[in-house]
Image (cartoon, rainbow, N blue to C red):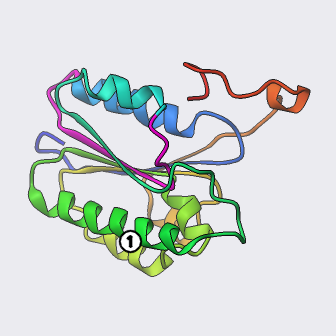
């Protein structure tokens, strides 16, 4: 970014905070005048707080590719495959535009794990990342091949979560 070699980041693991960490990185980059695009895979629900914030921040664009419903493993719908493909096509278009300093592929690891996209396609995208672009991949179950290609990998580990005690997702915290 800004003439330096961009790195590949992965935020993975079963703990909470992967999308949140990538958004924190985006806010930091925006503070230095970067243009950031986040493509959310498997997320079509319009109530995420980050969508509201993105509309207020110059330089941050969030594109959702997914149904507004939760995708259960083994119960993927044809639309889930179509939306994942649309997300990947959008990522490739953004990468080649030359107008993005940081590209975040939110929940891409889950889309790969569920078989909505082939791993090889994402590996090729990572290998062809523009020199100065920061690339961030989020989601559980990051594949070892991606971890090996990445420059920075953070694994979020769940130690305790209120969901286990019956607390449901809260506006402004989980979404």
Q: Residues within 10 Å of mark 1 (few under 14, many from 20)?
A: some
Region in magenta: 31-46
x and y percent of residue 171 in the render?
59, 20
Residue identified by numbered label 1: 85
- At x 14% / y 63%, what residue is drawn? 96
In this rendering, is residue 27 above or below 153? above
Give the number of marks: 1
Drawn side of residue 159 relative to residue 126, left or right: right
Residue sitting at 44 percent across and 37 percent down? Answer: 46
Query: Relative to 122, is 55 on the left or the right?
Result: left
**Above or below, comparing residue 53 to residue 100 in the picture:** above
Q: Which quarter shows the C terminus?
A: top right
Q: Nearer the viewer, residue 2 or 117?
A: 117
Q: Is residue 37 magenta?
A: yes
- Going by the image, does 80 lie left or right of 98? right
Position in image of residue 29 (x %, y %): 26, 30
Give the residue at x 30% y 28%.
Answer: 54
Is 152 magenta? The answer is no
> For residue 102, which quarter of the picture?
top left
- Residue 90, compared with residue 172, is above or below; it is below
- Which image quadrant is residue 30 in? top left
Q: Is residue 88 visible?
A: yes
Q: Residue furthest right?
A: 165
The percent coordinates of residue 113 (x first, y second) are 61, 68
Residue at 70% x, 60% y: name it.
Answer: 72
* Depth check, front residue: 158 or 174: 174
Quadrant that contains the N terminus: top left
Where in the figure is residue 12, as x and y percent of width and height? 60, 49
């Amino acid at each position: 970014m800004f003439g330096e070699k961009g790195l590949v980041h992965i935020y993975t693991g079963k703990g909470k905070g992967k999308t949140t960490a990538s958004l924190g990185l985006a806010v930091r980059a925006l503070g230095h005048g970067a243009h950031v695009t986040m493509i959310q895979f498997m997320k079509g629900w319009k109530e995420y707080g980050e969508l509201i914030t993105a509309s207020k921040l110059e330089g941050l664009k969030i594109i959702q590719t997914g149904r507004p419903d939760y995708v259960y493993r083994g119960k993927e719908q044809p639309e889930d495959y179509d939306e994942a493909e649309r997300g990947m096509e959008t990522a490739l278009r953004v990468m080649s535009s030359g107008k993005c300093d940081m590209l975040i592929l939110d929940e891409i690891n889950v889309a790969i794990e569920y078989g909505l996209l082939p791993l090889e396609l994402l590996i090729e995208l990572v290998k062809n990342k523009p020199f100065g672009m920061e690339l961030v991949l989020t989601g559980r179950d990051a594949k070892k091949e991606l971890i090996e290609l990445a420059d920075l990998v953070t694994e979020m580990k769940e130690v305790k979560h209120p969901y286990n005690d019956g607390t449901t997702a809260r506006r402004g915290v989980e979404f």
